[in-house]
Amino acid sequence: MPMPCTATLARLRPWSRLAPVAMTTVLLAALTMAGPGRAAEILVHSGQKIAFLGDSITQFGWDQRSGYVRLVMLGLKVNGVDAMAIPAGVSGNMSNNMLGRLQSDVLDTKPNWMLISCGVNDVWHTPGGVPLPDFKHNMTEIVSRAQAKGIKVMILTATMIGENANNLFNRKLVAYNAFLRRLAARRHCLLADVGADMRTQVKKEIAKGRQAGCLFTVDGVHPNPRGNMMMAADILKAFGCNHTQLSKARRAWLNVHWTLSVVYQIRVTRQLTLSQFLCLQKQGHKNTSAAIWDQVQSWFAGYLNAMPAVQHFDERVQHLFNMYIHHKLRAMGKR
């Protein structure tokens, strides 16, 4: 019996022509059901341990309530994931230092996850930094040893060294971050590309007329609350959080407290929520690259100088500072 021709098969099995369309419809329906309004599956689960290996950015990320490590853990918690952080950031560390203490600070704690933030000091510490070939070796070893113990790895690209993409450090950092992206792809690690995100965000702010300097950092390197929120959001995205879950995390972050500290002959402080910090920063950063606390110090100095009866070393200065910030925030609708 002769084989039927293609046209005959099409007439006998019309479903064969519809199969690709039907399959596409099913896939689109599945994607729609998993859209931003529905809960995404976060890769970290309750009870798991997350080690945060890094330098001073990571150390401060845990030591400060508004640090990115704390914000990541809070973001997970408000989305139903009660995980445990293992802080392993040490100020001044480079990739060789992290490799040297990997066993004691990470592997021996038996985490389920390891997040590694490295590269800033390898480039910034000149002389004495880590050349790119050695950086590649160190980072590959760190990832390999962690994965050999069954630890899942997320790699963070290095954030900017000074909020100027064209300076010498940031030009050199490009090759380090490019390697980290390749390493993440080759070793099947999650990637939080905080370095690229920071460059993009700084560029956007400059386009709006703002002057870079301390938009996302306190000193050009270490994140301020806004920079910490950016880093934490990128990490949560890499963990699988969708838009709805990220919005829930951001709402929780806005209530986290941060200490504003300025000096006007004596040091005065004021607790602010991150929401209040963002309002002050938005008002102050338009035409200057100074950190927000330097700007507030200047504002407060002008306020005190207009009150000649005030003795600047008087204990009332702290009270006056509290009142000044209260009135400033109230004027912006942020009490």
Image (cartoon, rainbow, N blue to C red):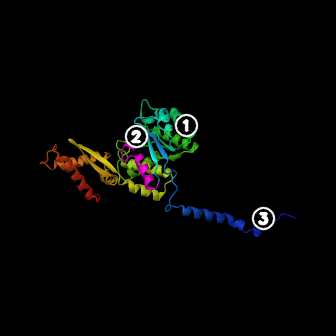
Mark 3–mark 2 Cα distance, whole angstroms, equals 67 Å
Mark 3–mark 1 Cα distance, whole angstroms, equals 56 Å
Residue ID at (55%, 41%): 183
Please indicate, yes or no, whether residue 163 appears anywhere in the rendered image: no
The residue tagged 1 is 145
Looking at the rendered structure, which numbered label has been put on residue 6?
Answer: 3
- Magenta segment's dominant SS is helix
The residue tagged 2 is 59
Residue ID at (46%, 57%): 245
Q: Position of residue 113 (x, y in %)?
A: 51, 44
| Mark 1 nearby-residue class (10 Å; few <14, some 14–19, many ≥20) | some
User: Which residue type does callout 2 highlight?
Assistant: Gln
Q: Position of residue 184 (x, y in %)?
A: 54, 43
Is the N terminus in the top left, top right, bottom left or bottom right quadrant?
bottom right
Residue ID at (30%, 47%): 259
Mark 2–mark 1 Cα distance, whole angstroms, equals 22 Å
| Mark 3 nearby-residue class (10 Å; few <14, some 14–19, many ≥20) | few
Left or right side of 237 for 202: left
Mark sitting earlier along the chain (3/2)? 3
Eye-nearest disc, 3 or 1: 1
Left or right side of 147 for 272: left
